[in-house]
Image (tube, coloured by chain):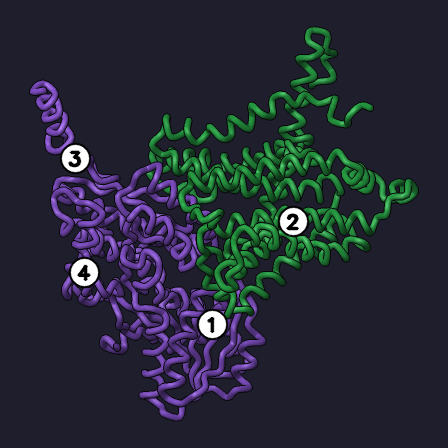
């Protein structure tokens, strides 16, 4: 009997304390493996190459300093071609096959929405999804507690723009040109709120993703006699709309939501783009704050090719800073759960890249304000303080 | 009387079915990434069901369809709405949704009575755009372009949630789909469809009702796509219009061609080949490129797919199944095979 008890005690010891605890996926003594799903060959492939390059630059900087708690950060990148099904397959591969610790910066709203079930099933956090959609910070949705958003939502951006326009001119007649997809839907949500707030009706014109001709929409805006037009597009759309309007001798004030902040918009639109005002939720990459200064130093140090340097590359860098801070706060032996807790401890965290960020158990929204950036004489100039 | 299946060796089919059902156990035993492999196999299974139907339409009947992603979408959205918003049981949706999509196919079949070839392809492609617009317009039901969350399938009170469970659900239907597909192909219907493909005039002269059989081909193909759509929606948990773009329809055609048109087994082989290539080998190549050159591979998938299509069309127009048949005949005749027959 004593022998049996002895054997049971030995088995119990092995079963409880003596056996080393299995490490978290993606964590070794020398490395933290993270997964990123980008659009490398789809409609947003230009951003897909640039954004993770900015992140890798910052990871290299951290790794050169000894990494996070002695571990180097390594990022695996997969291509989803802006197709949700491919995003699911790529995420599944990264989590189940490559065993990444967390997901980072997945680009696009519908790809991010599509991978929610996998995040929820495996308990894998997604940090800084590269989309402005306000749905990313909706905690009631599946895996909402695992997603940490950084960007000001499209709905908030639209609200802030209308507030700004109405503040300048209470008789303004406002129009909106929006992409008829999840991006546009999120903008419309914000617009419907300000319509109720001011008792106005915003003239709405939609277009399909990938459209190249906007004569019909521009003509309708012209007929509406609008004073201010918000364009919820990316790069090509605002350029073509403003040029078409100029050709029709239609000269309202043009504004754009987050993705139109790309400097190419104003430059490609030429004289038609002069005065174009876009929203931006971080410090400008070429400004004098500490974050942008460090960014420019690192670009020089690591010999980043000139075409990469700019707003989206800087965005990759800024979101990488946020992830690294979260990893630091996750402790010496990080788990997915401790990463979530680490991020939820952000209380006005100041990175000098984004405005101060606060996360909590009930708030994963990140930034909720924007600055307005205007094209003046072919250059982007910040014309406002933070607007909420 | 001799049965029409007597000439086939069917003894290996139970072995194959046993292999299909034991595969997850084997994968779990040999790889910690088995969930990913099961996910890929599940996707392949859904596409096999659709492609068996597409092969009956395009391979057997010769009616080109570039709208099968839209058929898949109709099946997926119909089932998601019926189950999650109207409270229809999943088991009933498994029957109703494919029939509804079959009826859609029937309607799309009307133009096929007057047009063929490239023009029919363009018409079915147009159907894809119309379906997308309809899905976006019926926002109250479909959530527009934001996408729709879909519940997991519930069968006999059991919720099917994991990749493991999904595998058994999907492959049960894959086996049923292949058996029915083979039966149709070897039946009077199948022979009539092939007769229409080879010569419409000759078929009509033989007493085959062209309109009836063409519409029937679209109806059957729609049922297959509808079933695939139901399984796709409930095992993916999320669907959106971005899932079902025109490229997916082209992707289906490639699968059927690579496998070998006019062969049910060819559709299966082609689907497995392309899905496994896309999800297992292309990422492997991309990872190696990333490792060796410290750069993203970008559009390597398009390059590989383009190359495969090119090579198959030039050197192996009968597809993978055609290759298998050639190999089989070669070994049967060995060593008396005339060289020129196999080069």
The chain ID associated with circle 3 is: A
Where residue B151 sits: x, y (%)? Answer: 44, 55
In the visual, does B202 lie left or right of A137?
right
Is residue B275 positioned above or below B20 on the image? below
Separation of disc 3 and disc 1 at Cα? 52 Å
Residue at 65% x, 28% y is B321
- Could you tell me which quadrant the C terminus of chain B lies in? top right
Q: Which mark is residue B223?
A: 2
Q: Is residue A81 visible?
A: no
Q: Earlier in the sequence, mark 3 or mark 4?
A: 3
- How busy is the neighbourhood of tag 4: few (under 14 within 10 Å), some, or many (20 plus)? many
Query: CA gap, disc 3 to disc 4?
Result: 38 Å
Q: Which mark is residue A257?
A: none
* Residue ranking furthest to the right: B205
Side of A25 relative to B269 (left or right): left
Label 2, label 1: how many angstroms apart (C-alpha)? 36 Å
Q: Which residue is mark 1?
A: A178
Residue for point 87% across, 41% down = B203
The residue carrying pointer 2 sits among few (fewer than 14), some (14 to 19) or many (20 or more) residues within 10 Å by Cα, namely: many
- How far separated are the C-alphas under marks 1 and 4? 32 Å
Residue at the far top in the pictured view:
B335
Estimate the x, y position of residue B212 in percent, counting from the top left.
Answer: 81, 50
- Crowding at dot 1, Cα within 10 Å, few <14 / some 14-19 / many 20+, comes out as many
The colour of chain A is purple
> Distance between the Cα atoms at labels 2 and 3?
51 Å
Q: Residue under label 3, please give it.
A: A21
- Which of disc 1 and disc 3 is earlier in sequence? 3
Q: Which residue is mark 4?
A: A291
Which is more toward the observer, B205 or B116?
B205
Q: Nearer the viewer, mark 3 or mark 4?
A: 3
For the N terminus of chain B, the image quarter is top right
């Amino acid at each position: 009997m004593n022998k049996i008890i002895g054997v049971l005690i030995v088995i119990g010891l092995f079963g409880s304390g003596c056996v080393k605890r299995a490490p978290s996926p993606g964590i070794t003594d020398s490395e933290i493996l993270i997964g990123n799903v980008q659009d490398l060959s789809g409609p947003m492939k230009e951003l897909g190459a640039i954004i993770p390059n900015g992140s890798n630059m910052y990871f290299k900087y951290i790794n050169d300093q000894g990494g996070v708690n002695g571990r180097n950060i390594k990022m695996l990148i997969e291509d989803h071609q802006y197709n949700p099904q491919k995003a699911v397959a790529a995420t599944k591969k990264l989590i189940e096959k490559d065993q990444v610790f967390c997901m980072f910066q997945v680009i696009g709203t519908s790809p991010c929405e599509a991978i929610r079930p996998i995040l929820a099933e495996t308990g894998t956090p997604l940090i800084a999804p590269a989309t402005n959609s306000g749905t990313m910070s909706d905690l009631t949705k599946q895996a909402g507690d695992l997603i940490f958003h950084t960007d000001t939502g499209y709905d908030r951006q639209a609200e802030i723009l209308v507030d700004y326009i109405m503040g300048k001119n209470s008789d303004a007649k406002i129009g909106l040109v929006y992409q008829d997809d999840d991006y546009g839907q999120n903008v419309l949500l914000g617009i419907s709120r300000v319509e109720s707030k001011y008792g106005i009706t915003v003239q709405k014109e939609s277009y399909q993703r990938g459209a190249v001709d906007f004569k019909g929409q521009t003509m309708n805006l012209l007929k509406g006699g609008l004073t201010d037009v918000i364009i919820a597009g990316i790069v090509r759309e605002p350029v073509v709309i403003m040029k078409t309007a100029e050709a029709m001798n239609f000269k309202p004030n043009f504004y754009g939501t987050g993705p139109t902040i790309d400097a190419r918009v104003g430059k490609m639109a030429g004289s038609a783009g002069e005065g174009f005002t876009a929203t931006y939720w971080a410090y400008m990459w070429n400004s004098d704050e500490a974050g942008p200064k460090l960014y420019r130093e690192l670009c020089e140090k690591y010999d980043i090719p000139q075409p990469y340097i700019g707003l989206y590359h800087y965005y990759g860098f800024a979101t990488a800073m946020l992830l690294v801070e979260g990893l630091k706060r996750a402790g010496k032996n990080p788990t997915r759960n401790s990463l979530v807790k680490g991020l939820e401890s952000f209380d006005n965290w100041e990175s000098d890249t984004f405005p101060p960020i606060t996360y909590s158990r009930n708030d994963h929204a990140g930034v909720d304000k924007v600055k307005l950036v205007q094209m003046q004489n072919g250059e982007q100039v910040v014309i406002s303080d933070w607007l909420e | 009387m001799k049965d029409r299946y007597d000439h086939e060796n069917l003894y290996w089919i139970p072995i194959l079915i046993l292999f299909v059902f034991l595969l997850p156990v084997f994968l779990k035993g040999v790889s910690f990434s088995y969930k990913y492999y099961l996910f890929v196999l599940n996707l392949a299974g859904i596409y096999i069901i659709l492609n068996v139907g597409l092969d009956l339409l395009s391979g057997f009947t010769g009616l080109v369809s570039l709208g099968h992603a839209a058929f898949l979408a109709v099946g997926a959205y119909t089932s998601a709405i019926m189950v999650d918003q109207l409270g229809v049981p999943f088991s009933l949706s498994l029957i109703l949704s494919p029939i509804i999509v079959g009826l859609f196919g029937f309607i799309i079949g009307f133009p096929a009575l007057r047009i063929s070839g490239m023009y029919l392809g363009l018409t079915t492609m147009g159907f894809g755009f119309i379906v997308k617009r309809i899905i976006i317009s019926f926002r109250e039901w479909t959530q527009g372009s934001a996408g729709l969350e879909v519940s997991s399938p519930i069968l006999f009170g059991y919720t099917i949630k994991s990749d493991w469970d999904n595998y058994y659900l999907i492959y049960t239907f894959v086996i049923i789909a292949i058996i029915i597909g083979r039966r149709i192909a070897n039946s009077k219907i199948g022979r009539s469809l092939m007769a229409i493909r080879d010569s419409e005039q000759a078929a009509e002269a033989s007493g085959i009702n062209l309109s009836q059989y063409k519409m029937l081909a679209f109806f059957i193909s729609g049922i297959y796509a509808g079933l695939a759509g139901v399984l796709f929606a409930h095992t993916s948990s999320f669907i959106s219009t971005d899932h079902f773009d025109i490229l997916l329809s082209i992707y289906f055609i490639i699968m059927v061609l690579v496998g070998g048109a006019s062969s049910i087994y060819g559709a299966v082989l082609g689907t497995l080949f392309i899905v496994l290539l896309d999800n297992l080998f292309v990422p492997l190549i991309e990872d190696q490129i990333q490792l060796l050159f410290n750069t993203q591979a970008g559009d390597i998938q398009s390059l590989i797919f383009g190359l495969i299509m090119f090579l198959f069309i030039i050197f192996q127009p009968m597809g993978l199944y055609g290759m298998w048949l050639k190999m089989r005949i070669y070994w049967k005749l060995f060593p008396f095979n005339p060289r020129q027959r196999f080069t």
